[in-house]
Amino acid sequence: QKSHKKVILSRVMATGSSNNTNQQSLPSVPITLKWSKQSYSNQIYIHQGCTAISLKEEILALTGVPTHRQKLLCRSAWKGTLQNDFIFTNLPETKNKSTLVVTLIGSAEKPPDPRPSTSKTKFIEDFTEQEIAKEAAIQATKDLENAEGMVPCLQKLPGSERDEDKNKLGSYQYNHFVNGLPQWQIEDMFRRRRVENSNKLLGEVGMTLGMELRRAYVNTIGLLEDGTLVSGCDDGRVHFWRHGEKVGEVVHEGRLPGGVDCMVVLRNDEWGCELATGGRGCLRLWTGYGECVAMFESPFGVTPSSLVEVHLEHENGANNERKTTSSCLVTSFRVVYQPDPNRFRLLPQNEEGLRRRAEAQAQEAVLQHSLSRAVRCLQLWCAPPSNNNDNNTSNASLVGVQSQVLEPENHEYALPVTALAGLSDDTATTKNNHSNECASMLIAGDEVGGLRVWKCHNINGTHEQILCEHIDLLQLQPQNSTDPVSIVCMQPLKNDLLAVSTEQRQNVTPSSEEEQSSSHLSQAHTIPIPSTSAVFIIDIEMRSLNVVLDAHKDTVRCMASLHPNGGGGLATGGGKMDATIRLWDEEQVYDTAISFTGAEESATRTTNGEQNDNSTLSPQPHVFTDAPKLKEVGYVFAMALVPDTKPGSGCFALALARYNVVKICL
């Protein structure tokens, strides 16, 4: 039987080959096959006597459309679709055309998946909350990698939210409180800075936060750890801004009228909160979402004017790892009490009235003395020890807050404090006898150019043993004037450098011998300055003046370091008569090449870093009188650096408080 089948198969193959030979010798007509958007010309022929099946098999080999799916249409050759039993006994006429046009209708078969999926289709309703959160986090990470920058207060979340304004051009209204450039245009600015490898601002305002017609002015601004921008107004309201929206608003309430005068972002977790605001006669601590955790009242008749956080670090003796154990808030005050000028105008006509008048005058004198003492001293609050494992924020977590009053030496001759700043002291462990002790420095500037330096210790890491030691006293004295200068604002920099802005002191005529002596601090180390109103870069460790930045026509009212860690350049904002913002390069701010006149440079300092009074050298710091200006914004009250939180990015923006609004400059 097997041999019989082989004979039959050989005969069929011979017959097929003979048929192909006969078809090639028979008359034929070329066809043009049109299928979907494709066309095949002179690749298929209709031979006389061939069947429709043979034609469809040739089309299958050419297009991949199965024969049972093929619908062939040709009005000049057959009617309707070509049937399988049709035989071309007579060749169709082409009617003055070189080929016969045939239309093919049908879809080709897709090759089968060699590895068919065995997983079932999973709908969104089948996912758990944890799985949805995980997928959202993965997608957010991918979107952030593809996005150009992530400044939380300025930019929306990467993805669909940023694509909503692709058709907009120029500034437009985001919502009732925010207007600015479209998100794609903000991304384009960051991309331009990244491509040019430039960390310099372009000078364009990307977004305006707040209402221009609002009555309250913005006094101070700050940036939380998550990138939320916080602004404090002179009506006591505190606004939280994130992703181009106002996400929160709280009121800083107090017993006195006024607004939010100062603000500091807390970097230590011991407080259980992220923000501290001062004003209206009290200090309030807030969480990142606007919940008030605690409130500390200031002495009668005064309100906080400047606020700074000082970190106290302790070195663990077991493994020599340094960890932050305590955090202190330090504030200075200004007088808001206004006595009645007509209270003692009339003289009593009897002894009882004279007695009451004398008692009232004595009470008023005591009150004025306490107010004078309050503005000369500093109030310090120490955070409670973080010995609990409860992460919930509540008022109970601040039980045990300690308070201290820092009085300067010879406080009878001290002047009111006008500005505060904090510097980290990395050399404290080598200078002290305590091997496990570390400290931070606190600098207080006053009305006569004095810089009082305090060192805050956390002895043995215990919360009860916190010591604040007055270690140095400096005074900025103009070279060409006998009138003292007043400290306006200060900005900490790296390498123990401090940027100090000064102005000529008002009402310099002393009314008493004590005021005359207080204007010139006899125990202070004098640092000569070439002008009364400029920005001076002071080396606190070396007690010297390094650089003078003198380009503004008016007193510099606010400053900001153009790097999150204090490095980089410096931004300075001039007063109302200047109304400009200058951007100083890092090379200018940290210029240490001081020229000398007299003897050689090697004799300028003693071995311990102090200036040699016996030498005849006269150090001359570099004076820079020009720096690029931002072409927009103008006069501002406060400024803060807004860095890009995307990993590896060095871009940043600058938040500027201008009257009623906050402008973010790119």
Image (spheres, rainbow, N blue to C red):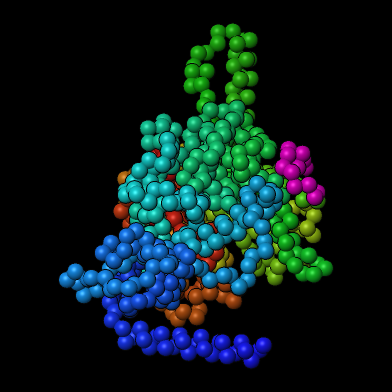
The residue stretch that appears in magenta: 388-401
Question: Residue 566 location, x and y as percent?
Answer: 53, 61
Q: Residue at x 47, y 60 (%)?
A: 147
Q: Quadrant of residue 548?
A: bottom left
Q: Residue at x 64, y 37 (%)?
A: 291
Q: Is residue 395 magenta?
A: yes
* Observer able to see residue 418: no
Q: Residue at x 34, y 53 (%)?
A: 204
Q: In this view, does 402 lie above or below 47?
A: above
Of residues 336 and 11, the one nearer the viewer is 11
Q: Is residue 351 magenta?
A: no
Q: The C terminus is located in which quarter? A: bottom left
Q: Main secondary structure of the magenta part?
A: loop
Of residues 152 and 295, the one nearer the viewer is 152
Q: Is residue 153 above or below residue 507?
A: below
Q: The N terminus is located in which quarter? A: bottom right
Question: Residue 424 location, x and y as percent?
Answer: 62, 61
- Determine whether, in the image, residue 43 is placed left or right of residue 500: left
Q: In which quarter of the image is residue 62?
A: bottom left
- Determine whether, in the image, residue 616 is placed left or right of residue 252: left
Question: Residue 628 location, x and y as percent?
Answer: 33, 60
Q: Is residue 442 above or below residue 63?
A: above
Q: Residue furthest left?
A: 96
Q: Which residue is drawn at 38% across and 46% down?
A: 180
Q: Residue furthest top?
A: 350
